[in-house]
Amino acid sequence: MTDSRRGGARGSATARRRGSAASRVAVTVAALTILLSIAVWQVARSGWPRRAPPPLAPMNPAPAISVEEARRVILSLLESEDHLRGVPIARDVAARLGSPAWEFEVCFASLLHNAALQAGTRSSYERVAMMRESLAELDRAEALIRDSRDLAEVLEMRARELGVWGFQWETLMELMRAQSADPSSAAIAERAFRYRDLLRDPTSPGPP
């Protein structure tokens, strides 16, 4: 009798475990079904598969400008009193210049130099940055020049800029280079001579 009861109890426990396992499986399947339905709904809502975005339209570069037009613009900016306001315009013209021209580079350098000395600059850092940009424009002009007399004019212009900023020995070096480029220029020779004397004797009359 006792063995029969024990056998019945074991059978009941086994049945309960099987029923519990079946219930867990059913719950898991139901949960996965719900998650799959949610995923399908989200995909359908987002319109998958998504189409690739249309390619961006190429940006049209600014039209090139001729050397004559660039020279006209830069000269008009030099004639104005607000050189600082003209610098961004000149930079845009320089970027659109179809072919390099030393005359434009020289005028642009002069504009930058004048703008750096105006009261509207925001800081000493901006003044120095424009001075360096001006000297860089003169370097470009020097690389493009083929005539020695034109080269002498550019070198003298660089000497004047350096003199304004207090670079005395660099000024003399550029004047000597200018004199070497155009020995026939009496004006450059006189300026170099007087500047050399000024460095030797600060009481002597400086160059004109």
Image (cartoon, rainbow, N blue to C red):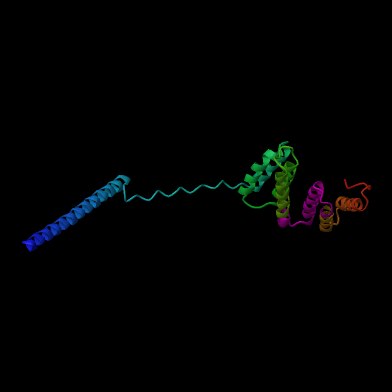
Residue situated furthest top in the rendering: 81
Give the position of the C terminus as an image quadrant. top right
Question: Of residues 4 and 37, which is closer to you in this image?
Answer: 4
Residue 144 location (% of width, % of height) = 71, 56
Residue 70 location (% of width, % of height) = 66, 45
| Residue 190 shown in magenta | no
Question: Of residues 20 and 52, which is closer to you in this image?
Answer: 20
17 to the left or right of 103: left
Q: How many numbered badges does the structure rendering display?
A: 0
Residue 191 location (% of width, % of height) = 87, 50
Q: Quadrant of residue 116?
A: top right
Residue situated furthest front in the rendering: 2
Question: Of residues 63 and 208, which is closer to you in this image?
Answer: 208
Which residue is at 23% across, 53% downward? Answer: 28
Which residue is at 74% across, 57% downward? Answer: 146
Which residue is at 54% across, 48% downward? Answer: 61
Residue situated furthest bottom in the rendering: 3
103 to the left or right of 47: right
Question: Of residues 79 and 50, which is closer to you in this image?
Answer: 50
> Residue 173, relative to residue 94: is it above or below?
below
Give the position of the N terminus as an image quadrant. bottom left
The part of the chain drawn in magenta is 141-170
| Residue 143 shown in magenta | yes
Which residue is at 18% across, 53% downward? Answer: 23
Q: Main secondary structure of the magenta part?
A: helix
143 to the left or right of 63: right
158 to the left or right of 66: right
Residue 57 location (% of width, % of height) = 46, 47
